[in-house]
Amino acid sequence: MPDEAALRNPGRGLGWRVRAAVAGRVVLATFGAYGVAALSTAFLSLVLPMVRSEAVATATLLSFAIMVGAVVWVFAARTLARAALGLAVPAALLAGGLWLALALVDTAPPA
Amino acid sequence: MTPSSVLLNLALSFAGLSALCLAMDRHHRAIFHGSPSRKRARALRWTGWCGIAVSFAAAILTADWNFGPVQWLGSLTGAALVLVGLVSYRPGWVRPAAILALPLAAVAAFLA
Amino acid sequence: MRRGFRQSMAWLHTWSGLVTGWVMFCVFVTGTATYYRTDISLWMRPELRAAAVAPGVAAERGAAYLKVHAPKAVSWFVSLPQEDRPLIGVYWLDSFEAPIRQASLDAETGQPTTARATQGGDFLYRFHYELQMMPMLGRWIVGASALVLLVALVSGIVTHRRIFADFFTFRRDRSAQRGWLDAHNVTGVLALPFHLMITYTGIVTLAFTLMPWGIASAYRGDEMRFYVEAGQTPAWRAAAGRPAEALPLAPLVDRARAEVSEPLEMVIVNNPGDAASTVVAVFEEPKGLAHRHPQVAFEAVSGEVVARLGTLKPAAHAFTSFLGLHEAHFAGPALRGLFFLCGLMGSATIATGLVLWSVARAPKPGLAPGFGLRLVRGLNLGTVLGLPIGIAAFFLANRLLPVALEARAAWEGGAFFAAWGLAALVGFARPHGRTWREMGTVAGLLFLSLPLVGALTTDRGLDFVWFDLAMVAIAAGLGSGAWTLSRYEDVRRTRVARTAQTLARA
């Protein structure tokens, strides 16, 4: 993160690089963290070993903690690239798992 | 979850938190005009944690496991707020208030 | 991270707290008021007295009104008179897409009530979670702000390195910034369990709006089927498409009441008048944390029981317990008082945090504040004092507007927003310390006038003495807050004067 002194006087001593890095983290924290939380909810709702409604309730309850953890990670990571990588890897794994689960788990309504 | 059981919790939490507060050097000096001895600080700390533990037990006994923890946490917050008010505005009242909390707790326990 | 974890979390706390602070302050204040929603509603309908009507009879009165006014609805809802809400509330859906419509009926006659038209405490309640906007937009704004607040809470805990050492510390005698910081820390730390609980559970109340992806994947987006499988609502029975005469409601309601010990809260009629119509008796929550209503569903024509809903599976129980904790319907008067206190402390944490941001960035004497600082100062004033002024105006409008006024309930809401908007404009025009003092005094006087205006315009004697006392307490809080602020200002001014003298002498 840029240092506090620079941020207190925007326009002075705050290069576009720093601004872009902050903006990048905000965007990543908003959409990236939500994306990871959404994927984990969808995935866990299908694969948690419990009745379906219970899995959905559990996954949804957990999702917000996952999202906050992801946001903290985005702002704590040393560089923007690391932050992005730290979200992209779990997101890719979850997306793959979700794709498999959607193919394997029967979600059709009862006849 | 009667008012008297909440009062019991508040009184016990207040007494416990006061002891914990007085075990801290800064507050002890503000109230007794001197640092606490090591032994005294440890005794106060023990008393404080015991008070909070007893408060938890009282919450479980009077409001069961369903509401007890909620009531216990709420009473800790309420008691701590009163305590901070006294420490900042009427430091001289902290000790008498903490001592007075004990008979109050006894009365509330009798009613609860 | 160029600097440590703690510093980056401090940065995150500062900025996430700032962007979410204004919305969350409003949400906390109105939510805290909502702990006393029924008391506010009773105060706002002074014409009503407690009515003793058998639940079955009341249900039939509500259904009789609906039969005339909403014969083609897909669902009727009749909420029964309770001690704290002596009215029959009727609600209906003309179709699943249509907005819900409603009327309030006199419990004794079943005719539309002659009590003044008002939204009562529901106004603040609705504001609390959808800001009186279009429902979905408002809920998303509140939900997203609450998520940001959760981030601010977590990063704030990490940032506050002296959490235990400063636990009881409020240094009111030091600099203004120190005082604000201590006030922020004390109100934040002492009620931290509440803050975390209320923010997380608040997000959970909006969970399926914010995070519909579990239902999307496991139920292909069919939310209804989720609730049915989770045991929270009886299965929907499609209309048969041919009319049939339903059994009278009262005997069905009495049969349901014989099964469940809680008071009956609402009767729902699905597909009224149809051969496949169902009647659902919904009871109040049993003693327990979970927000779940026992229900008994009947076939309306044959009277056969089609569903009984009671106990829940563990995760659903946890989920509903989160909702129950948030609403605290289980709390008796003393515990409710503690919840209220915690809510006030949450509001104070947010308000002091917002003020702290601007105090910490005050320009050196002689320098003009920048645009960002002026904006924040204006928004702080307009929110922290503007909202209480709006609420006071809302209550005053309830007492002062003519009872027969057309669209009266809307005018009350109008008074709320008009007074708030006016206060916010003043705040933007003169975002100074003095304005805080003056507006705080105005807000205090408005609340102080409420018991007086209430006594002059109603004849309820001491029925509302608790409400009046609360208003006086709020007035005292706002007044003394304004007074404290002015003292800070004076201290600073004398200090500046003294420094100037010293400099002049040197």
Image (cartoon, coloured by chain):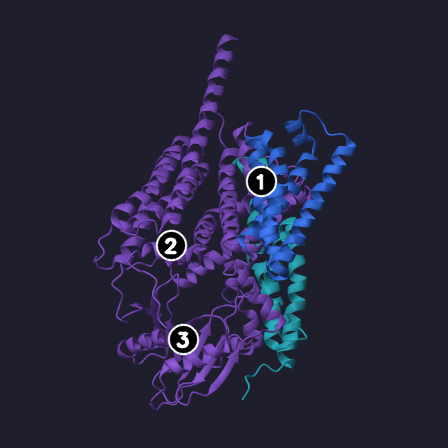
- Residue B30 showing in the rendered view: yes
Kind of residue indicated by mark 2: Ile
How many numbered discs, if any? Answer: 3
Chain that bears disc 2: C
Horizontal and vertical percent position of residue B80: 59, 42
Q: Give the residue pinned by disc 1.
A: C186
Q: Which mark's residue is nearer the viewer, 2 or 1?
A: 2
Percent position (x, y) of residue A65?
Answer: 62, 59
Q: Marks 2/1: CA distance?
A: 30 Å
Left or right of residue C412, residue A105 in this image: right
Q: Secondary structure at mark 1?
A: helix
- In the rendered image of this protein, which colour is used for chain A? cyan
Q: Residues within 10 Å of mark 2 (few under 14, many from 20)?
A: many
- Sequence-wise first label, 2 or 1: 2
Describe residue C92's horizontal placement relative to residue C338 as left or right.
left
Residue linked to disc 3? C267
Few, some or many residues within 10 Å of mark 3 (<14, 14–19, 20+): many
Question: Residue under circle 2?
Answer: C40
Which residue, as the protein is rendered here, is positioned at the far top? Answer: C505
The three-letter code of the residue at mark 3 reads Val
Q: Name the chain under label 1.
A: C
Query: Which one is closest to the eye, mark 1 or mark 3?
Result: 3
The answer to whether C254 is drawn above or below residue A33 in the figure is below
